[in-house]
Image (cartoon, rainbow, N blue to C red):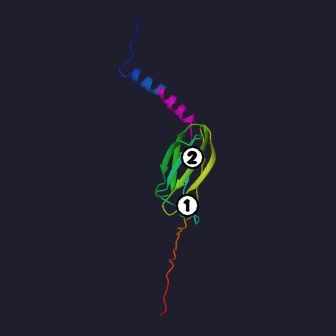
Amino acid sequence: MLAVAPRGALAQTAVASAAPASGQAAQNTGGIRGQVADPSGAVIPGAAVVVLNGEGKVAAKATSDAGGSYSVRGLAPGTYSVWVTAQGFAAYRVPGIAVTAGQVKSLNPALQIQVEQQQVEVQAENTTIGTA
């Protein structure tokens, strides 16, 4: 005698068996997260966070939220560099961040206030003053 499964039972089995595979994929990657702040500890919202792989190519991008927090996930295991920039602050770069599968590294950049430099060039002209 052949048993017939109720309608939809096969679809539920297929979805249930696919779930561990997606969880397993997450275990094969890692991430970097943290909070961007200034030297006094005040958070910096809207900071651009760029993660570069070992070849110098962009692997991921994020923007810090209103609380200065950012998170980058889904990075393949490897060594990365992180660049953080925000208007009015000097760029922050950290090379050599080792990301391993199943772990999220913590990186809390403290951006330095950028001092604006101005260069003034003065040119003198030879002017002859006549005395009569």
Callout 2 amino acid: Ile
**Residue 113 image offset from top left, x and y in percent:** 55, 65
Question: Residue reaching furthest bottom?
Answer: 132
Rate crowding at label 1 as few (under 14), some (14 to 19) or many (20 or more) other CA atoms within 10 Å. Answer: some
Rate crowding at label 2 as few (under 14), some (14 to 19) or many (20 or more) other CA atoms within 10 Å. Answer: many
Region in magenta: 18-30
The answer to whether residue 21 is magenta is: yes
Q: Which mark is residue 11?
A: none
**Residue ID for mark 2:** 32
Dot 2 lies on which element?
A: strand
Identify the residue at image location x=55%, y=44%. 52
Give 67 or 19, whichever is nearer the viewer: 67
Callout 1 amino acid: Ala
| Majority SS type along the magenta span | helix
Q: Earlier in the sequence, mark 1 or mark 2?
A: 2
Dot 1 lies on which element?
A: loop
**Residue 7 image offset from top left, x and y in percent:** 35, 20
Q: Is residue 6 above or below residue 43?
A: above
Image quadrant where residue 9 sits: top left
**Residue ID for mark 1:** 90
Figure quadrant of the N terminus: top left
Image quadrant where residue 56 sits: top right
**Residue 54 image offset from top left, x and y in percent:** 60, 41
The answer to whether residue 121 is magenta is: no
**Residue 63 image offset from top left, x and y in percent:** 47, 52
Q: Measure the alpha-carbon separation of dots 1 and 2.
A: 21 Å
Question: Residue reaching furthest top?
Answer: 1
